[in-house]
Image (tube, rainbow, N blue to C red):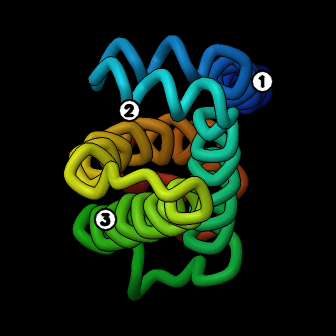
Amino acid sequence: MRKNFILLFLGIVISVLFLVFSAVVMESIYYEREFSNEMYNQSLYIVVAIIDVVVAWALAGLFYYVVNSVLFSRWYHWLLIAIIASAAASVAAWMSCNRVFIEDNIDFSTQLTIFSLVNSLIEFVLFTIVSFSVRWWSSNCRHTPIPE
């Protein structure tokens, strides 16, 4: 039982650290000078990080506590939800950043598309971390995606 709370605490800490260091993490994975400067100046990295964290925790909670069915307790069901989380976070981030760029009459469509694809990988990793943080209290899916 203690291990479960430690993993939950670690998931929360990693999520908070990701929010705090979102610009550093995202720029270390994808950096293009003008695009990255504009993302930083407009505080869009934190917006994208908030979207990523909310989607990861919401969809992990949905999978482990709302769906929570023996019929959906296989690794490929978890993978489907992880892919949906990655796609949803990427689309939401693309839309919110693109709206800001359109308002400023800046065209970063190519860079934003590449950034969104990279963001989907970040979301997948974050969803995996959150899954291992919250799965322990699920009655049917606690062993998904990888058994103890």
Question: Looking at the picture, how far across and down is residue 124, in whole percent?
Answer: 37, 46
Q: Quadrant of residue 4?
A: top right
- Earlier in the chain: of badge 1 and badge 3, it is 1
Residue in the picture at 69% in, 33% down:
43
Residue labelled with disc 1: 9
Residue in the picture at 55% in, 20% down:
23
Residue labelled with disc 2: 35
At label 3, counting other C-alpha atoms closer than 10 Å, the crowd grade (few under 14, some 14-19, many 20 or more) is some
Residue in the picture at 25% in, 50% down:
117
Q: Label 1, label 3: how many angstroms apart (C-alpha)?
A: 24 Å
Question: Looking at the picture, how far across and down is residue 111, in whole percent?
Answer: 26, 44
122 or 113: nearer the eye?
Answer: 113
Amino acid at circle 1: Phe
- Earlier in the chain: of badge 2 and badge 3, it is 2
Q: Label 2, label 1: how many angstroms apart (C-alpha)?
A: 34 Å
59 over 31 or under it: above or below? below
Residue in the picture at 59% in, 77% down:
68
